[in-house]
Image (cartoon, rainbow, N blue to C red):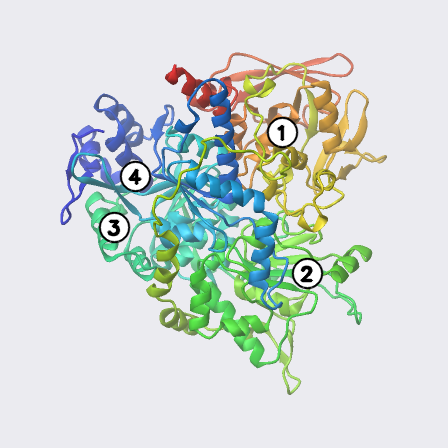
Amino acid sequence: MNTDYRKPLPGTDLDYFDTRAAVDAIQSGAYDKLPYTSRILAEQLVRRCEPESLTDSLKQLIERQRTLDFPWYPARVVCHDILGQTALVDLAGLRDAIAEKGGDPSKVNPVVPTQLIVDHSLAVEHPGFEKDAFQKNRDVEERRNADRFHFINWTKTAFDNVDVIPPGNGIMHQINLEKMSPVVQVRSDGSGRSVAYPDTCVGTDSHTPMVDALGVISVGVGGLEAENVMLGNPSMMRLPDIVGVELTGKLKPGITGTDLVLALTEFLRRERVVGAYLEFYGEGADSLSVGDRATIANMTPEYGATAGMFFIDDQTIEYLKLTGREDDQVALVETFAKVTGLWADSLKTAEYERVLKFDLSGVERNLAGPSNPHALLPVSQLHDRGIAKEWEEEEGLMPDGAVIIAAITSCTNTSNPRNIIGAGLLARNANKLGLVRKPWVKSSLAPGSKTVKMYLEESGLLPELQNLGFDVVAFACTTCNGMSGALDPEIQKEVIERDLYATAVLSGNRNFDGRIHPYAKQAFLASPPLVVAYAIAGTIRFDIEKDALGKDQDGNPIYLKDIWPSDEEIDAIVKSAVKPEQFRKTYIPMFEKKGDGARAASPLYDWRPQSTYIRRPPYWEGNMAGQRQMKGMRPLAILPDNITTDHLSPSNAILLDSAAGAYLHKMGLPEEDFNSYATHRGDHLTAQRATLANPKLFNEMCRDDNGDVIQGSLARVEPEGQQMRMWEAIETYMERKQPLIIVAGADYGQGSSRDWAAKGVALAGVEVIAAEGFERIHRTNLIGMGVMPLQFEEGTTRNTLKLDGTEIYDVEGELAPRATLTLVITRKNGDVDRVPMICRLDTAEEVSVYANGGILQKFAKEFMAEAG
């Protein structure tokens, strides 16, 4: 630790590191010009760097250099149970591998505090209009996930530095926002005085940036990168692009934070902020509640950025008080921010290389969709866009565009009391006028925190939502994560037999094809009040602003405007019904230390051979343990633009006719307990059968007799040219020990930060992904699994090269950060093309990880070298 700039923090008995003095010592007045992000990154350099390297590291921030790596040490790691469990399965497997080499497995532990929240396991099998739905869903969750929960409970006593929040308590991001982040950390360093410093974290979910709303640098990473940080290694980074986003104006009456973020997402995607750290400021940002800020920060991955920062200000302090933080901690946050230049007023002199402006007053009532969260759909344009259109109502039959799922779900919106209270008031107004939910709509309310239910009860609005079928079904992710649960058999039968265009409307952040439910052909994102309105309308073909939702007792038509609550009423109820004691009642018991408890009998996990949830991973065996040769590769798939991690490794329900379903049936699981792809990711034998298993996939190698690409989880095995199911093709190639390549278009790997999108292809034998561009998290996951990401140079694509999948591919060249390598393409007729490619190992650390075969292999080698 560098002590040169350590000073007492005024008004406290703590120390801090005077980053301003360190920066200004290099260049006078430079600190005032630094953006918020740079100030926090500079603080950790001053606190962590050795004196001899500090000057060079700080110069990178001052001069905006992006050519050298510097270490970032996040204060903590947060995980949801899917990727968190998978990461801990990997660490348990790593313990086995080290024990077999003669090492001490008990020494493999997270070094950085790691918080795991079980929130991705529950499916809405019992909807919000069914009695005791919450308890019934929890009972199903416990039964289905017994193996997983057994392992997770073992980790609490087997690993140091792991805290587990059990199921039924809420969503990782909302708990992080409402409780886990202190905004300013305090740690003892053994000197007798504790040190205050900014809270920072990485999380195994792309929506981890939600807590950026509190001024906390918090980014989503893949499970593999999180494992690296857990084990005490820095996250090596270069200064990111830091973009200022000036928010001007004020939202119009009746416009929600959801409407704002959907418009902002489309705007920022268009402005190409992929990978950037955004800093929101201006009069518009000042006027937004922390709930609205959190809605914006939550959807950072949807607009492609890495972080969506807001500054610490009076709104932050009021929110910390509202959510029941201790008075001393709230005072510390204010003091620390003002002393260190992290208070909003101190950022007025910050300079940005790029500034975007967005006017809040231009935001309309919006949906997003279909299929993409950045596909903005103003409700005023439903008719013009062909969404709302005339349809013939047939008695006893569901309509075209039937909304089969209407879900108030996801931390994006349930963390924002204005959105939830707005939905409750709309429900109250609808009930007064006799409006009802259509019988084919599976409705649900799944808040991210127990506090939501408390303030809905306090305000008297929970019964209003219950009356329309929106009772609380869970405190978990549910529908947004593809865990919508089964449909009523009669409804499912009608959807299939009539090939009905069925849809979902949810207050989530993701609506990719096939994600929400296998029988919902498309999905639309909406604010919680609009979700309730669509449950009443019953079809997406409805012009929600103009068409009548029903008639009152006098036969007069009822429109959306007749039941939409006023901002004044929403704000009044938020002020009277949302209270600090609700948050204290929720979180004090949840985070109470129950004593050390007994340690696990063994540092090694007793793997259950028949489990389809938890299995010892194979990453230290055979070809997985070393660098790939990248010779003689055949293409597994040639894919279009915008391939998401849902395409690469879907998370939704497993159907019997899928490869994973056939395997689970063979293993003796009843179909009703197949659960989701996501929950089986601790067992590679189940999870790898999900590789490219999305039925909405378009593999351009698979075409019909007319030459049109066929939709489905399909592949064509070469050299035979035989088309078959993707998993059968993978098995065929695995038996042949055939190395593979995937060729793709732009924005490859966007979406959720799931490491299995990389693990699946790696286990299939894919050694290279050649694409026009990569989403940040997925690229690092590929490297973490020893898969080479290669990027086409501008102007070169799979189409310009006229690739058809009959080719054989080699890679030539010396590995170095962003080196130019050569993709050698040998065509069926013997012609050879030599295509220059950008090696997307962007840093020296990434080259080292790749050269060792991946993160886990690298750690095992280093651990044994140190032990020896």
Alpha-carbon distance for marks 1 and 2?
33 Å
In the foreground, 396 or 393: 396
Mark 2 and mark 3 lie on one chain; the one further toward the N terminus is: 3
* Tag 1: amino acid: Val
Disc 1 target residue: 761
Label of residue 40 in the image? 4
Classify mark 2: residues with Cα within 10 Å, few (<14), some (14-19) or many (20+). many
Alpha-carbon distance for marks 4 and 3?
14 Å
- SS assignment at label 2: strand
Classify mark 1: residues with Cα within 10 Å, few (<14), some (14-19) or many (20+). many
* Tag 3: amino acid: Val
Disc 2 target residue: 404
Q: Is residue 444 above or below residue 61?
A: below
Q: Residue furthest right?
A: 705
Q: Is residue 367 visible?
A: no
In the foreground, 93 or 743: 93
Disc 3 target residue: 333
Alpha-carbon distance for marks 3 and 1?
45 Å
Mark 3 and mark 1 lie on one chain; the one further toward the N terminus is: 3
Residue 603 x %, y %: 45, 31
* Tag 2: amino acid: Ile
For the N terminus, which image quadrant? top left
Label of residue 777 in the image? none
In the foreground, 40 or 228: 228
Mark 4 against mark 3, which lies toward the viewer? 3
- SS assignment at label 1: helix
